[in-house]
Amino acid sequence: MQILRSARWLLLTLLLSLFPVSSYSQIEISVGFAPPEMPVYEQPICPQPNLMWTPGYWAYSNDDGDYYWVPGAWVPAPYEGALWTPDYWDWSGGRYGFHRGYWGRHIGYYGGINYGFGYGGIGFAGGEWRGNSFAYNTAVVHVNETVIHTTYVDRTVVERGIVANPRHVAYNGGPGGIQHTASPAERAAEKEQHTAPTSVQTQHATAARADKTSFAKANGGHPKTLAVQKPLAAEKHATPAAVKSEAKPKVETKTEAKPKAEPKSEAKPKAEPKSEVKPKAEPKSEVKPKAEARPKAEPKTEARPKAEPKPESRPAPAAHVEAKPQSHPAPASHPAPASHPAPASHPAPAARPAPASHPAPASHPAPKEEPKKK
């Protein structure tokens, strides 16, 4: 009979896990006495990327009339961007109701119960999705950083999400319970599309129920197995429709990025002005007229005729030569120099209008007087 009841329970949980629900926080079980305190334990090290931590919790068996502990475990995310909102108990009308956890894009309300490891009572501070990879906040979770490289440390987000629970109470409301009401963000998350626990998670809870040492009556509220070291098996689920619609705007932003490429084509006209710079180079060729400065060199050639009178001034040095014969009688035989009057025939150049202004050649008769001294 007990086996039949267990089979029915397992079948029900399997059916619930196959269908996403808009709000998966309804009361499934109502109990007349409070669950035991939350035990304190160490979190196993996350061995591989994209595993989500699902805290341990107290479940209840109607057949056994007792609470039993479901160990915490690392669970592969059923879809990219999935976050786990934990199970919790609350008090209402003198009874304690159980709310099953769910997968969603945002963390919903879980009664303000401080489960530790990022679940301080409000939200989740243990990490965040960055694209298709989950980044772990090593300020509150333990991961194998030699394998997992997407990590960071943020203690402020941890402090913001902690609800004081010094007595480790496992339920919300009622006498001695956690006094935390859902925030607007938590209520908004509850209205989103959710996915029920995977069948692997359900099997994990069923295995804990089958272990009699996990019941509070057997362990006095101190379970032997508080968390499992090995991660649960992966089970992929379809991304909720609401999430897909949120992803569409991301695609639109990618298409909007294409117009940004158009300005690149507009940059081509900018290249055309560069060709206009070539005409600017033409004035540089006009600088060539500067070579007209060469005519300045032509006046230099005109100065050459001025150099012609210089040989005419040479007779003056000739006079110096004649002075030397005066000291040397032997040179007296140099009447030939006296023939130098031939230069006097240079008056032909004097016919040039310009040389006419040179009276100096007319002074050559003075040398003729020198032979008279002889």
Image: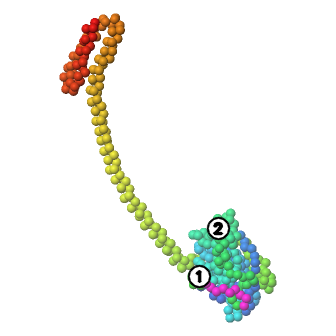
Which residue, as the protein is rendered here, is positioned at the far front?
Answer: 373
Could you tell whether 18 is left or right of 91 in the image?
left
SS under mark 1: helix
Give the residue displayed 67% in from the left and 76% down from the top: 159
Q: Quadrant of residue 346?
A: top left
Is residue 321 depicted above or below 27 in this figure?
above
Taking depth in this image into account, of 196 and 52 the one nearest to the observer is 52
Residue 284 placed where, x, y %?
Answer: 33, 46
User: According to the image, label 2 marks what residue?
Assistant: 151
Report whether residue 196 is seen: no
Give the residue displayed 24% in from the left and 20% down from the top: 361
* Circles 1, 2 touching at the beta carbon (< 8 Å): no
User: According to the image, label 1 marks what residue?
Assistant: 185
Is residue 78 depicted above or below 94 in this figure?
above
Report whether residue 124 is seen: yes
Q: Quadrant of residue 63?
A: bottom right
